[in-house]
Amino acid sequence: MDIYFPSGFPMFRGITRLSNNCLERAKRLKACVGGFLQRQDLSSLCKYRKPRLTLEECLMWKESFEKLLSSKHGLYAFKAFLVSEFSEENIAFYLACEDYKSTKSATKMPSKAKRIYEEFIGNEATREVNIDYETRDITQANLKSPTASCFDMAQYRIYILMEKDCYPRFLRSNEYRNLVNQLTMKSAKARSKKAIAARPPCEEDEPK
């Protein structure tokens, strides 16, 4: 038997306050952790990862989602962005499918396919991705006889989701714009130093 409490009932008000408090705490935690991850990971592209990221490569990411993913630094930055938004399962699933398709041993495919399905698609998936029921059912049926293409439909759905939703938000993010600004300043300084070094010395500076 279901029990319903009126809105003025003390227990109901207490539960509502508790839910709101938890929600607010979760939002603050997401903002703090997300900002930390973005600042740490994206700034490291300018300083620590080799080969160093250039302004030209960073600007190239705006041309297409495919170019972003094909760039080592671009993929790293996009993954950091998704982690900060708590949606890293999308890129993790996409990359898992890419790795699966490169499996050379047919005997390893069933176990790898099962592991990917259970982690990202199954009813109790720990990192469930957002795909429609038809795609889920087709993928599940494909697992009965796993081939290199059994995740193609699901991978395509997630690729389109990232391209239409996550990718534009990444380009509009403060973190990406700050990264472009950092690289622009760094590039300008490098050109200035190069121009000074190439400039001929003034006559009064020449040794007598």
Image (cartoon, helix red, strand yellow):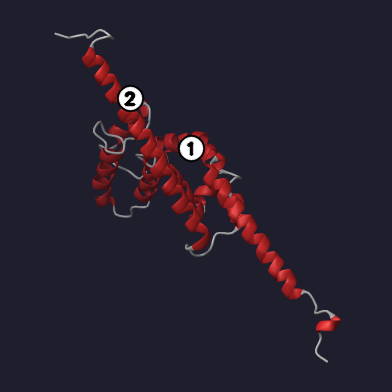
The residue mark sitting in front, 1 or 2, is 2
Residue drawn at (52%, 37%) of the image:
169
Task: Quadrant for the C terminus, please.
Answer: bottom right
The x and y percentages for residue 56 are 62, 56
Q: Secondary structure at mark 1?
A: helix
- Answer few, some or many: residues within 10 Å of disc 1's Cα (few below 14, many 20 plus, some between 14 and 19): many
Residue at image mark 2: 20
Q: Amino acid at mark 1?
A: Cys
In front of the other: 51 or 194: 194
Q: Residues within 10 Å of mark 2 (few under 14, many from 20)?
A: few
Residue drawn at the location 52% of the way across and 46% of the way down: 175
According to the picture, the residue beneath numbered tag 1 turns out to be: 166
* In this view, 163 is above or below 9: below
Residue 135 higher or lower than 205, as above or below:
above
Residue 58 place in picture, x, y as percent = 58, 52
Side (left or right) of 33 relative to 61: left
Q: Residue 45 at x, y = what percent?
A: 50, 57
Q: Hey, which quadrant is residue 16 in on the image?
A: top left
